[in-house]
Amino acid sequence: MGLLVHVLSIFTGFWAPLIIYLIKRDSKFISFHALQSLLWHVLYMVGAMVFVFALIFIFFATFMTHVVAQHGAGPPPLTLFMVFPFFWLGMILLWAVNLLLGIVFAMKASAGEWAMYPLVGKWALRTVSS
């Protein structure tokens, strides 16, 4: 079940860890893996949203600066087109980290290890232990 938490979280985000955490509260091992996967995906979603909103802000700030400075005349600034590759690169990197963590921790959970995710593992262990 620990393996299942991490594998399903790759495809379902925080839904599978949330459901498994609520169902398997009697097992500390499964609760630990489900809770840390759940916390990781909440952190992942918040990070992705901050990244997206920052790029949207840069896009509109550049666009408005161009419109105000040149009254809409002339070609659009190059910065408008430079935002999109960074957006896709950032989202692909976030997805790759999420995929890698899901695979690595699925293997560790199937081996019976109490391996901890970066940033959220200790908090999940403290929560499950208390």
Image (spheres, grey):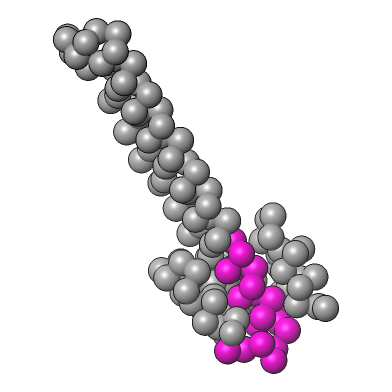
Q: Which part of the image, by quadrant, shows the C terminus?
A: bottom right
The number of numbered discs placed on residues in the rendered structure image is 0
Q: Position of residue 49 (x, y in %)?
A: 46, 48
Q: Does the rendering let one see residue 116?
A: yes
Q: Is residue 10 above or below residue 61?
A: below
Q: Position of residue 20 (x, y in %)?
A: 55, 83
Q: Is residue 73 above or below residue 92?
A: above
Q: Residue at x 66, y 80 (%)?
A: 31
Q: Residue at x 75, y 64 (%)?
A: 123
For residue 14, side relative to residue 110 (left or right): left
For residue 28, side relative to residue 72 (left or right): right
Of residue 89 and residue 126, the one placed in the foreground of this image is 126
Q: Residue most toward the right? A: 130
Q: Residue most toward the bottom? A: 26
Of residue 43 and residue 53, the one placed in the foreground of this image is 53
Q: Position of residue 60 (x, y in %)?
A: 34, 28
Q: Position of residue 96 (x, y in %)?
A: 46, 52
Q: Does the rendering let one see residue 105?
A: no
Q: Which part of the image, by quadrant, shows the N terminus?
A: bottom right
Q: Main secondary structure of the magenta part?
A: helix
Q: Residue at x 47, y 48 (%)?
A: 48
- Residue 49 among magenta residues: no
Q: Start and end of the magenta stretch?
A: 23-40
- Residue 24 among magenta residues: yes
Q: Is residue 120 above or below residue 127?
A: above
For residue 122, side relative to residue 20 (left or right): right
Q: Residue at x 42, y 70 (%)?
A: 12
